[in-house]
Image (tube, coloured by chain):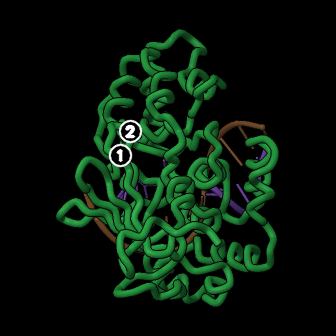
Chain colours: A green, B purple, C brown
Amino acid sequence: MPRVLNEQREGEDGVLLIPASPWFDPDRILDCGQCFRWRRGPDGRWSGVVGNLPARLHRRGDGWRLESLRGSEAFWRAYFDLETDYNAVEGQYRGLDSRLDTALELGRGIRILRQPFWETTVSFVLSANNNIPRIQGMIGRLCEAAGEPLGADCYGFPAPEAAAGLSEAHLRAMGFGYRAPFVVRLAEGFAAGRWAEDRFREGSTETARKGLLELPGVGPKVADCILLFSLGRRDAFPVDTWIKKTLAALDQGKPQGQHILNCLTEPCENGFAGYVQQVLFYAARYQKWGI
DNA sequence: CTCCAGGGATCAG
DNA sequence: CTGATCCATGGA
């Protein structure tokens, strides 16, 4: 039985206090395209659901207060990757390129989440050739249709068995388009015990990547997103349309054949290519960073 | 109207 | 192996 978050008082939500620092910025962590179920209220307070765990996050005193009724401290510390020194990570990539330095500043405070495997897989299969607001809507409707009710207008992410109860026609009616059959096949496969998470946690990133490519609707980019945003593979570097444009721009003026991507993915002590990728994506997609 | 969105599956060479 | 084409949908 995992330890529940410290109880402030009987009957109150479990609470995890996270010290304020430049390396923890919920406005960037939760709205940078790596997760789709958190919302920022007009007062700046965040609320979301991870798996079947509803949570709230807001500024409190000299830190951040995470409230989650049933989540363990260990779960949330892992979710927000609190053991990683992001200052040291950024240090590995600072000074290589002035424009990269700018992106690192713009994205400072982002952390790479460790999200549930099944939920992350479905979410990023839905992300293919799609835009973020619509992805959020599709996932929201999926949860409403098959997720566990968790309170007022709040639903868990449906387990594979529950998702498997939705027909392709039902999913298409929810606006899933040609992704509907992928979700059906994924739900059936996960419910049948194929594609156990452990299989992708063992071995090299490249081996895990090859395994993920067998899943319906999972290609190179989505596989990298699953590796990075769920499985904690720091060397994964998802390349989407935004990153392609950004890398092309960064490579301008570089000596022939010397691509910045090669520098970023080169293994090093505090190497975290996926973090750099996310910072570049955030700068390009959210800050309309002109390079 | 066209173009694009955190691409993938399929098929042609 | 690489490259072209099609794929649903909704917003700009």
Secondary structure, mark 2, is loop
Q: Amino acid at mark 2?
A: Trp
Q: Quadrant of the N terminus of chain A?
A: bottom right
Question: In the displayed structure, does residue A60 sit left or right of residue A200?
Answer: left
Tell me: residue A138, above or below residue B10.
below
Image spot of residue A162 (x, y percent)? 63, 86
For disc 2, the chain is A
Q: Work out whether residue A61 or residue A86 is closer to the camera in this orientation and state it.
A: A61
Residue A14 seen in this snapshot: yes
- Bin the neighbour count of mark 1 within 10 Å (Cα to Cα): few under 14, some 14-19, many 20 and up: some
Rendered residue at 56%/61% (across/down): A75
Alpha carbon distance from label 2 to label 1? 10 Å
> On the image, which quarter does residue A284 sit in?
top left
Q: Which residue is mark 2?
A: A23
For disc 1, the chain is A
Q: Which residue is mark 1?
A: A19
Rendered residue at 64%/67% (across/down): A118
Q: Residue furthest left?
A: A43
Residue A134 seen in this snapshot: no
Secondary structure, mark 1, is strand
